[in-house]
Amino acid sequence: MDYRDYIESNSEIMLGKPVIKGTRITVALILKKLSEGAKHEDIISGYPAITAPAINAALAYASDVVANETLISAA
């Protein structure tokens, strides 16, 4: 799966934060809901424009961002 099929970033939508294409639902919101224990079905029920593949795309996007993150030592 290519998360770019589901995720977009446009400076005119949600200040350029990554969102599910065709919505104003941010990847951050989906990740927050999942971290609070929501299941895919809960998110889809609360946000009918979201699909299971879109949720998986949000996870794949987050994984890619973290994998390419540069860590800076505090010391």
Image (tube, helix red, strand yellow):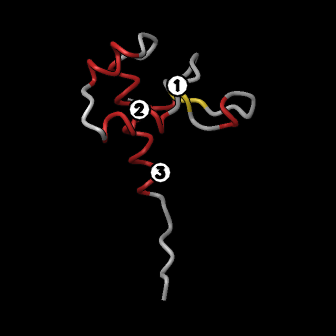
| Residue mark closest to the camera, 3 vs 2 | 2
Helix, strand or loop for disc 2 = helix
Place of residue 41 in the rendered image (x, y in percent of width and height, measured from the top left): 26, 18
Q: Are marks 3 and 1 in contact (CB under 8 Å)?
A: no
Q: Which residue is mark 3?
A: 65
Mark toward the start of the polypeptide (1 vs 2): 1
Tag 2: residue type? Answer: Ile
Place of residue 33 in the rendered image (x, y in percent of width and height, measured from the top left): 36, 33
The correct choice, above or below, for 5 with respect to 70 in the image is above
Q: Which part of the image, by quadrant, shows the N terminus?
A: top left
Tag 3: residue type? Answer: Val
**Furthest residue toward right:** 12
Q: Quadrant of residue 15?
A: top right
Work out how far the residue at label 1 is from the one at label 2, CA to CA, in angstroms.
Answer: 8 Å
| Residue mark closest to the camera, 3 vs 1 | 1
Q: Which residue is mark 2?
A: 30
Q: Which residue is mark 1?
A: 25
What's the residue at 51%, 76% (across, down)? 72
Work out how far the residue at label 3 is from the one at label 1, CA to CA, in angstroms.
Answer: 18 Å
What's the residue at 37%, 38% (across, down)? 59
Left or right of 7, for residue 1: left
Tag 1: residue type? Answer: Ile
The crowding category of the residue bearing disc 2, from other C-alpha atoms within 10 Å (few below 14, some 14 to 19, many at least 20), is many
Helix, strand or loop for disc 3 = helix
Mark toward the start of the polypeptide (3 vs 2): 2
Left or right of 43, for residue 65: right
Q: Are marks 3 and 2 in contact (CB under 8 Å)?
A: no
Q: Quadrant of residue 38?
A: top left
Left or right of 51, for residue 13: right
Mark toward the start of the polypeptide (3 vs 1): 1
Q: How many numbered marks appear?
A: 3
